[in-house]
Amino acid sequence: MTVRLLGVGLPTTRSDVRLVARTTRLVLSVPVYALFATLVALATLSAFVLSQNLALVGDVVLGGSLPLAARLRVLVELYPFVGTSYSLLSGTALVVVAALTGVDLAMVAYHVREHGLSAEGSGGSAAGVVLGALGAGCAACGSAVLAGVLSLVGASGLALLLPFDGVEFAVLASVALVLSMYWLADGMRGGSINGCPVDP
Amino acid sequence: MRRQTRRRFVAATALAVAGIAGCTGRTGSAGAGTEGTSGGATEPGDTDGRTTGSSESLDSHPAAAGLDAQPTLGPREATATIVAFEDPSCPRCRAFERNTVPRIRDELVATGQARFVARTYPVVYPWGEPAVQALESTFARSSEAFWGLFAHYFADQDAFSTDNVLPRTEEWLAANTDLDGAAVVADAEAGAYDDAVQVDLDAGEAAGVGRTTPTVFLFRDGEYVTRAGGSVSFDLLTSALGL
């Protein structure tokens, strides 16, 4: 039985999880959508990461007079697990959010193009991407960002209660994206993907 | 109906997040605990309207204001100058100090290729402010003790709080240096070196550091090259500097 909160269906049962997993797998079994998901994930991760150092990208990667190899080295060193800008935790969180964004938008694209339906539930994608972007900013900086934000509402001390230095936002982004994926899968229930039936 | 509710839910979430995302902009002063926005070590779109052209020189760049009076490692005539704005209480600064700074010292400073300038910039946790007062008070007496205390703050970062930072500082100075730890702490409590603290805050603010720590400004042959926010790697720095 699906739990509803304020009229919104939430994935709570094992069958809900299976539905999301199966729908996702079926969509990604179509090569063009798998490629689309990969490209979106890479673009999302790049947007998160490069937006943190626009001056560096402009001055050195795009501008300046360095040889190509040096420009590329500067570029890749900005990414999680290559450079040192992110901890294991925050780097993993960013990669997960980027991957979920890719899969989620591939599902949106499939639902709209193949089923000719409205992108119900895709609004969660936007929230997920925005949260992910915020998480990217926070994850790399520690809680300065949170202290600044919370001070606006007189609660700067609350930043100290967030032990993972802003990765919490990436977790929220993941939740929003997974919700979006569930709603999309729910919207495709009873249809077929790549010739295979989705759970009714 | 269900669809509308979902959309309302998502819209409300996005709106709330967008409000929070104001943190990625910039207003307010650079002082810790001040109202305003922040972006920590990586402020997305780290462009505060200030355009730092590559034609700026070390002599005129705001990040380098009063540079000769700052804690410095390496020769003044080195090919490259790395100016780092750091907060002792900042976790990503700790990562930078652990991963990148040792290689800067060993491979660039020791070989005379670069000088490394530390500018204290307390904008993260509240205990960073008294810590920076103590650092300036220490530096006025001994640069060697300054570097030791600076490293100590990062090494034991999790142990510090606003309440214990000065007593612990006094203990560390007494145990590890020839300085009068009590006098250093008394000066820190009295704000005896406020001017020195403010020079760094003003330089950071003028250079557009905002609340991003660490932020490093890179210069080569006396000319500005670029800036980088976050605990960037040694390879990134050397590649950007062409070393």
Image (spheres, helix red, strand yellow):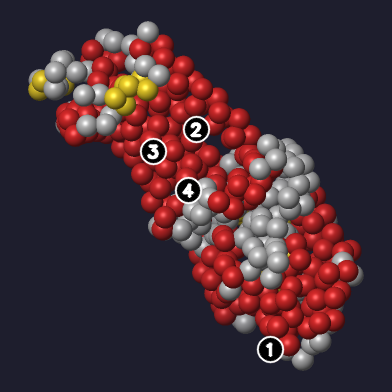
First in residue order: circle 4 vs circle 3: 4
Indicate whether B76 appears above or below A191: below
Residue B51, label in figure: none
* Distance (Cα) linking label 1 and label 4: 37 Å
In the rendered view, tell whether residue A149 sits above or below residue B152: above
The kind of residue tagged 4 is Val
Q: Secondary structure under badge 4?
A: helix
Residues under numbered marks 4 and 2 in contact, where contact means CB atoms less than 8 Å apart? no
The residue that mark 3 highlights is: A174
Q: Nearer the viewer, mark 4 or mark 2?
A: 4
Q: Dot 2 corresponds to which residue?
A: A130
Is circle 1 on the same chain as circle 3? no
- Can the viewer see residue B148? yes
Q: Are marks 1 and 2 on the same chain?
A: no
Q: Please tell me whether mark 3 sits on a helix, a strand or a loop.
A: helix
Residue at image point 49% right, 20% down: B11
Q: Nearer the viewer, residue B205 or B164?
A: B164
Q: Output the chain of dot 2.
A: A
* Inter-mark Cα distance, 1 to 2: 48 Å
Which residue, given by chain and number where applicable, does mark 4 sit on?
A: A167
Query: Distance from label 2 to label 3 (Cα)?
Result: 11 Å
> Residue B158 falls in which quadrant of the image?
bottom right
Residue B31: x and y in percent read 77, 52
Badge 1 vs badge 3, beta-carbon distance below 8 Å: no
Q: CA distance from mark 4 to mark 3?
A: 11 Å
Residue B74: percent from the left, percent from the top? 70, 78
Separation (CA) of disc 1 from disc 3: 47 Å
Total labels drawn: 4
What residue would you read off at disc 1?
A: B176
